[in-house]
Amino acid sequence: MIDHASEMAAFVRVVDSNGFSAAAPVLGLSPSAVSKLITRLETRLGVRLLQRTTRALHLTQEGEVFYAAAKRIVGEIESLENQIVGESGTPSGVLRVTTSLAFATHQLAPVLSEFLARYPLVQFELLPTDRVIDMVDEGIDVALRIGRLADTSFMARKIGEDKRLICAAPSYLARHGTPQRPEDLARHNCIVSRDQPYLNRWSFKVDGRLVEIDVRGRVAVAEGEAQMQLALQGIGIVRVTRLTLAQAIREGTLVPLLGAFSAEEAVAIHAVYPHRRHLAPKVPAFVNFLIEKFTPPPWEI
């Protein structure tokens, strides 16, 4: 028996993902299996739907007509299935989430056990990374992203804001003194970013004007979590996100510096997920849980 729906769904996913390899993880198939589905569909219809090149796929005229209708049909099928599955209101299945290492460590991990206890049928897969990954390519259900959103094809719900703070351990300040003004940083050892030089230019408001200072130090680190851990050891002054530093500041193991000169602007934190009329219950359950736990944001100090 010919599975028209599977062929149609595969075709729509390939077009939306712009490739067989990108569509394969979402469909749960290998790229070659996806390619065979599309070839079988084209053979059955007797027309070519896609023009394949080494770099991209392009819809033929017939493909454009078929895609418009197929996307609507596949969307209605998915909506019906999600509606039926979700009628019980019980989130279930594997929930794949990605976020930054800092957010995963300091904010998500402390509340995750409560989410799992509340929804015992949900299995959780977490991918902490500081790179922006392709949600479709890697089969991600929800991404927690900090800063400007580049992709407008997804739904996004704001769960808070964050900004960077300048801190040092009391042990460092005891040995080297506390900077009173931004220009004092020239005499201090700052823990700098190895891979993102722009993060080593710290902005301040001094006498009503914006001042940027290029900081320097003996230690350069690629990742913010490691920078904070080094600061806790008294190695130097660090500038890291508030959600990373909040607990250490509350405990007194790090001391905020130069707050009166801060020029930092808050950036939004969003939960990003696919735009569908009816989502599987696990996705809105998780997003609503985050908003519940992070209102007000526990990293505000």
Image (cartoon, grey):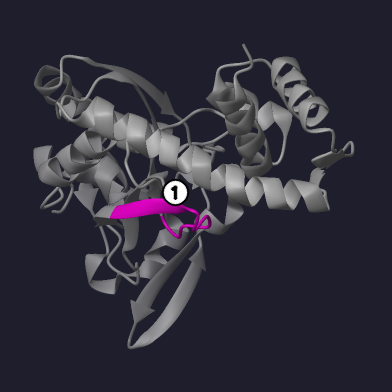
Residue 148 versus residue 201: which sits nearer the camera? 148
Left or right: residue 44 compared with residue 178: right
Residue 245's place in the image compared with 149, above or below, is: above
Q: Is residue 149 magenta?
A: yes
Q: Report the amino acid beneath label 1.
A: Cys
Residue 93: x, y in percent? 31, 18
- Residue indicated by mark 1: 190
Quadrant of the rendered image containing residue 282: top left
Residue 262 versus residue 268: which sits nearer the camera? 268
Question: Main SS type for the magenta part?
Answer: loop
Residue 65: x, y in percent? 70, 52
Residue 61: x, y in percent? 81, 53
Quadrant location of the N terminus in the rendered image: top right
Indicate the secondary structure of the residue bearing disc 1: loop
Q: Is residue 123 magenta?
A: no
Query: Residue at position x 58%, y 31% from top?
Result: 9
Quadrant location of the C terminus in the rendered image: bottom left
Looking at the image, the residue that sits furthest to the bottom is: 208
Looking at the image, the residue that sits furthest to the right is: 53
Left or right: residue 114 compared with residue 264: left
Residue 194: x, y in percent? 58, 42
Query: Which region is colored magenta?
Result: 147-157
